[in-house]
Image (cartoon, coloured by chain):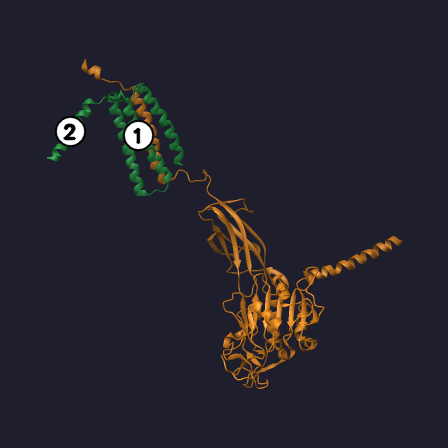
Chain colours: A orange, B green
């Protein structure tokens, strides 16, 4: 009786110990570390944080210079995403530094950082490692034509139209409302292929210190005034860098934008913040390849090798993360390349059997070692790059064409030679000289 | 003047040939002209139609060329006027070599014909 009691207790205890492991696996992608400027930020940005929690993220709040901050435990990162809402922090607490942040990104972690008119050195360092530059301390984005009339007269509370956003629904959602912004401007290098300008000012915006006279050309002008910039690294980690902390504040989410012509329109900040956070933390615009199949047309499994001029079929299973579930991704412009150093065949894939996309093509008349390559890079989506190697052999000696019609004369001549030799041999051996008969 | 001399040379050559060559050699010459004509026909056909099954063309053409060469060699060996150069090798031996070479030639030709 006692044994039964203890056995049951052990089972319950075991379940209790295992349960957090399962929970941990489910929440694997959603652990967020939030670094705050001060504890008050948690209250002034409560709508943003509650939106994140509604979307399933677990938030750990810490003040930015808290000495107890660690990113790694036993060599593994304990967070998947980091939010930095601390523009003026000069140095992070604990073991955190710009280098530790970039190491976090190199291991696949995502970052959402806000700067401000006064930006600390460590954030400037993170920005420059990510490919953007934050403007000098004291500068604001100023726009004398698109400002919110509720600001202090400096025209630093700027309105940006929805059309100044990057053209990708996956990154910025489908909102059309104007956006309210108060903060510094960022500079991005247009030749950097990984960086995108998520939100820019309108053509009349520029960045400068509002209380100083303008003596030189501002660092950013017009549409090059980047307010929110983004980077998708080569390992698909995402960084979103905003020049304004107030953009995410409750005040701006609930504000009504007064463009000066009398009409009051609600700001689109909340929709953009939600879409941006979901994109940045890899809940939207994420693809993965589940499998690749290739075979001769009509067969089911991949052969050991192919022969030149054979028909091949290739299928790839690509899934996209939508609302937390992996659903089949059906693009119309994904291409397959059949490459032996240079691509010999490039074929656009179409939706084929049961949610796979694939294509059929003829192997070229050249033998060698080829690769099936799929490279798919689109704005807002993670990159797909797969490569499968196959060998293509030349024809065996008994696979060539036989009895070609245009070669019949040659066949005829070869056999006629043989026949000729045969007849000649008989004639040559058995002819008799008739000279003796003539003389007689 | 020169045309008439060429004519006389050709006529003299033809007379000498018809009267003084043994019948055996004439048989070989007839065989050789047959091979030559077949070869020419093949070559003209290839020039017109193109070289698509090139191995078939080569096989047929080289069959003709090699047969011609073997025929010429046989004629040299069998000609009684050359007896001094082939001392120790009888004409029958020459004919046997001819047949042996032809067997090998035709084996190769059929293999390459594709």
Work out whether disc 2 and disc 1 sit on a shared chain: yes
Residue A18 appears in the picture as rendered: yes
Q: Which is nearer the N-term, disc 2 or disc 1?
A: 2
Could you say where residue B46 lies in the image, as x and y percent from the top left? Answer: 31, 40
Q: Nearer the viewer, residue A134 or A430?
A: A134
Chain letter of the residue carrying label 2: B
Give the number of the mark in front: 2 or 1.
1
In the displayed structure, would residue A428 be above or below residue A35? above
The residue at 82%/56% (across/down) is A10
Which residue is under mark 1?
A: B69
Chain letter, disc 1 residue: B
Q: Position of residue A154 (x, y in %)?
A: 56, 85
Residue found at the far left of this picture? B1
Name the residue that disc number 2 marks: B11
Marks 2 and 1 in Cβ contact (< 8 Å): no
Is A269 displayed left or right of A435 in the figure?
right
In the rendered image of this protein, does residue A264 appear above or below residue A405? below
Q: CA distance from mark 2 to mark 1?
A: 27 Å
């Amino acid at each position: 009786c006692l044994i039964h009691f203890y056995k049951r207790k052990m089972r319950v205890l075991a379940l209790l110990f295992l349960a957090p492991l399962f929970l941990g696996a489910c929440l694997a992608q959603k652990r967020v570390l939030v670094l705050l400027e001060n504890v008050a930020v948690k209250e002034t940005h409560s709508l943003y944080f509650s939106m994140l929690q509604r979307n399933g993220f677990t938030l750990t709040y810490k003040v930015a210079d808290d000495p107890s901050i660690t990113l790694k435990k036993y060599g593994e990162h304990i967070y998947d995403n980091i939010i930095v809402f601390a523009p003026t922090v000069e140095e992070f607490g604990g073991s955190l530094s710009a280098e530790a942040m970039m190491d976090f990104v190199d291991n696949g972690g995502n970052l959402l950082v806000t700067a401000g008119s006064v930006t600390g050195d460590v954030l400037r360092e993170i920005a420059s490692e990510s490919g953007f530059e934050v403007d000098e301390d004291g500068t604001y984005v100023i726009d004398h034509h698109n400002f919110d009339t509720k600001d202090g007269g400096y025209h630093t509370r700027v309105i940006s139209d929805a059309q100044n956003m990057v053209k990708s629904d996956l990154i910025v959602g489908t909102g059309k409302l104007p956006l309210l912004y108060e903060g510094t401007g960022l500079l991005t290098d247009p030749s950097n292929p990984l960086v995108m300008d998520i939100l820019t000012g309108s053509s009349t915006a520029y960045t400068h210190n509002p209380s100083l006279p303008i003596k030189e050309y501002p660092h950013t002008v017009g549409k090059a005034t980047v307010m929110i910039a983004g980077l998708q690294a080569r390992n698909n980690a995402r960084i979103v860098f905003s020049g304004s902390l107030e953009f995410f504040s409750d005040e701006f989410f609930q504000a009504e934008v007064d463009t000066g012509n009398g009409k009051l329109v609600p700001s689109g900040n909340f929709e953009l913040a939600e879409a941006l956070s979901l994109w940045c933390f890899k809940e939207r615009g994420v693809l993965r390849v589940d499998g690749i199949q290739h075979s001769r047309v009509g067969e089911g499994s991949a052969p050991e090798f192919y022969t030149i001029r054979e028909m091949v079929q290739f299928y790839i299973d690509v899934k996209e993360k939508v609302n937390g579930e992996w659903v089949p991704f059906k693009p119309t412009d994904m291409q397959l390349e059949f490459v032996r150093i240079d691509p010999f065949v490039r074929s656009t894939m179409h939706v084929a059997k049961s949610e796979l996309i694939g294509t059929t093509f003829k192997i070229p008349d050249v033998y060698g070692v080829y690769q099936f390559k799929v490279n798919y890079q689109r704005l807002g989506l993670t990159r797909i790059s797969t490569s499968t190697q196959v060998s293509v052999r030349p024809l065996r000696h008994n696979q060539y064409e036989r009895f070609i019609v245009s070669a019949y004369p040659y066949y005829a001549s070869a056999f006629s030679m043989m026949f000729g030799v045969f007849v000649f041999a008989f004639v040559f051996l058995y002819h008799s000289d008739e000279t003796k008969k003539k003389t007689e | 003047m020169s045309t008439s001399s060429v004519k006389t040379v050709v006529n003299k050559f033809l007379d000498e040939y018809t009267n003084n060559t043994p019948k055996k050699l004439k048989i070989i010459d007839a065989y050789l002209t047959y091979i030559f004509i077949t070869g020419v026909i093949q070559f003209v056909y290839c020039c017109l139609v193109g070289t698509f099954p090139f191995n078939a063309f080569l096989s047929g053409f080289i069959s003709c060329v090699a047969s011609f060469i073997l025929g010429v060699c046989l004629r040299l060996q069998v000609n009684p006027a050359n007896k001094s150069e082939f001392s120790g090798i009888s004409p029958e031996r020459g004919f046997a070599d001819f047949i042996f070479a032809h067997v090998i030639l035709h084996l190769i030709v059929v293999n390459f014909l594709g």
